[in-house]
Amino acid sequence: MLLPAEIRDLRCVAGMMVPASAEYGVPGADDPAIFADILASLDRDFDAVRAALAALAGGSFADLDDVRREAAMQALEEQGGTAPVTLMRVVVQCYYRDERVVRSLGLEPGPPFPKGRTLEQGDWSLLDPVRVRPKMWRDAPP
């Protein structure tokens, strides 16, 4: 479980990454429903997200002024590595799962193929070079 200061920092980061847009009628990633999804989705990414938050300002990111926050976010991005990428991925994947966001993109919310939607067929001959490759694995012993 994230500490209260880490939760505040994460909410601030989420809002900076994907701010609300009145023009497109979409909430920001710090919207209560989206943010609740972010918190509930940390599971395997918990340690990486916590490390990214610690790298930002060690529990006081939300208390920084706008200029310092931007600088800290820029420094985290430049630092690179797994933690910042994981933090960004968690925020973005939860944002684009929100039905309001999906609708704003002109899509129907929900799983992609539960209603027997048709998948446009592609050119299966593109797989021919893969099919003719020699075997690249060992069979498991019986």
Image: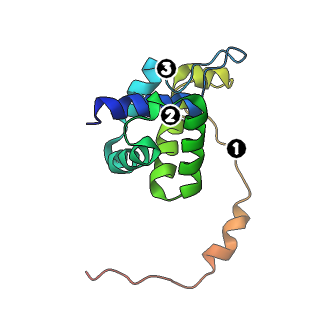
Please name the residue that numbered disc 2 is placed on.
13
79 to 14, vertically: above or below: below
101 to 132, vertically: above or below: above
| Crowd rating for badge 2 (residues with CA inside 10 Å; few <14, some 14–19, many 20+) | many
Please name the residue that numbered disc 1 is placed on.
120
Residue at position x 54%, y 29% from top?
65
Quadrant hosting residue 109: top right
The amino acid pointed to by label 1 is Glu
Q: Is the N terminus in the top left, top right, bottom left or bottom right quadrant?
A: top left
Residue 95 seen: yes
Please name the residue that numbered disc 3 is placed on.
31
- Can you tell which of label 1 and label 2 is closer to the viewer? 2
Residue at position x 36%, y 45% from top?
50
> Which circle's residue, 2 or 3, is located before the other in the chain?
2
The amino acid pointed to by label 2 is Val
37 to 22, vertically: above or below: below
64 to 124, vertically: above or below: above
> Which circle's residue, 1 or 2, is located before the other in the chain?
2
Q: Is the C terminus in the top left, top right, bottom left or bottom right quadrant?
A: bottom left
